[in-house]
Image (spheres, rainbow, N blue to C red):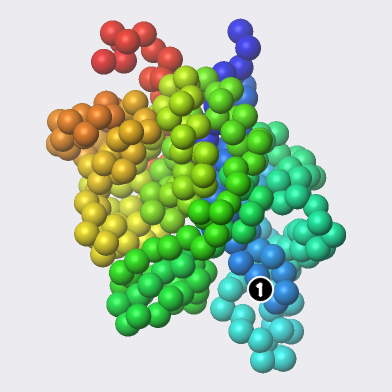
Amino acid sequence: MSPRKVCLIAGGVGGAKMAEGLAAHDDVALSVIGNVADDDSFHGLWVSPDIDTLTYSLAGRIDRAQGWGVADEGHRALETLKLFGADTWMSLGDRDFGLHIHRTMRRARGDRPSDIARDVARAFGVRPAILLPTDDVVQTRMRTTDGRWLRFQEYFVRERCAPEIREIAFTGLDMARPTPEALAAIAAADLIVIAPSNPLVSIAPILGVPGIGDALRAATARKVAVSPFIDGRVVKGPADRMMAALGLRADALGVARRYRTLVDRLVIDHADAALSAEIAAEGPTPHCSDIMMQTQADKARLAREIIDLAFAPAEAAA
């Protein structure tokens, strides 16, 4: 039997964990469409945090303790930059700098960002296809209660997610064009999975690229989302605080409402089983599981459960 074509829509640490779980199975041909709206320029270099987290994770090079960056890393380049008065709040390691230099050099000579991401993944020995939703620049901006507009990394890293937000915007999104690779992966997929990533700033800018959301709705694949919430809290990141600040339900039901027209099933944690009826009323059929992914075994188990759930006979999956 040929491997199932699985397309994962992912951003951040949760998306990388889901990618690792799916990649662990030989019967899966995995493509990952990653978030590029966190991208920004630091010290003259173009940095793509979510794409790099996916790449490092699937290559087995990720710093497991913090969930991002490269393992066995040093920060001598940042120390030198600090001597010259540079802002060094964005923690970029020495090995990491090598990738950012390579990416920036290739962008400067006009190479497609999608081609760069593909070649970087291959150089790191990554087998799944890491795809960009767009080759255009899309960037997340956050408006805080004091009226400031912050770039995403300023909010997330420099401000440590402390400011309360009032608005999220994606500059360049309305004019962005989808990559043919992303559209092809969605159209060809047997299964599309929305990872347990932040719905507002990791998944929304992917699905908001003109043509991507429509392609997802039109796809004939099974479609499953995994909630990033466990008992009203996220495992990592500010999604719960963000959703609450914007007047949205900050729990698995809130996720179901955002994905109601996009997926057939929503995998939630056993701790959220009481929300099952309300989730079903929104459209997606809920499925309770242990969605915490702490170990590689956890990731592979959850991925296998999602695959089996998606392709089970209707009566068995009910």
Q: Which percent across, then down, holds residue 93?
A: 68, 68
Name the residue nearer the viewer: 129 or 18. Answer: 129
User: Residue at the location (52% across, 47% down)?
Assistant: 209
Residue positioned 62% across, 25% down in the render: 29
Quarter occupied by the C terminus: top left
Tell me where residue 111 appears, x and y as whole percent. Answer: 80, 52
Quarter assignment of residue 149: bottom left
> Which residue occupies the foreground of this view, 49 or 91?
49
- Give the amino acid at mark 1: Phe
- Against 221, residue 33 (above or below) is below
Residue 180 vertical placement versus 106 (above, below): above
Q: Is residue 97 above or below residue 37?
A: below
Q: Residue at x 31, y 69 (%)?
A: 166
User: SS class of the residue under badge 1?
Assistant: strand
Image coordinates for residue 290, horizontal then vertical, percent = 33, 35
Quarter holding the N terminus is top right
- Number of other residues with Cα within 10 Å of mark 1, as a class: few under 14, some 14 to 19, many 20 or more: few
**Residue 107 falls left or right of residue 60:** right
The residue wearing badge 1 is 42
- The residue at 32%/61% (across/down) is 242
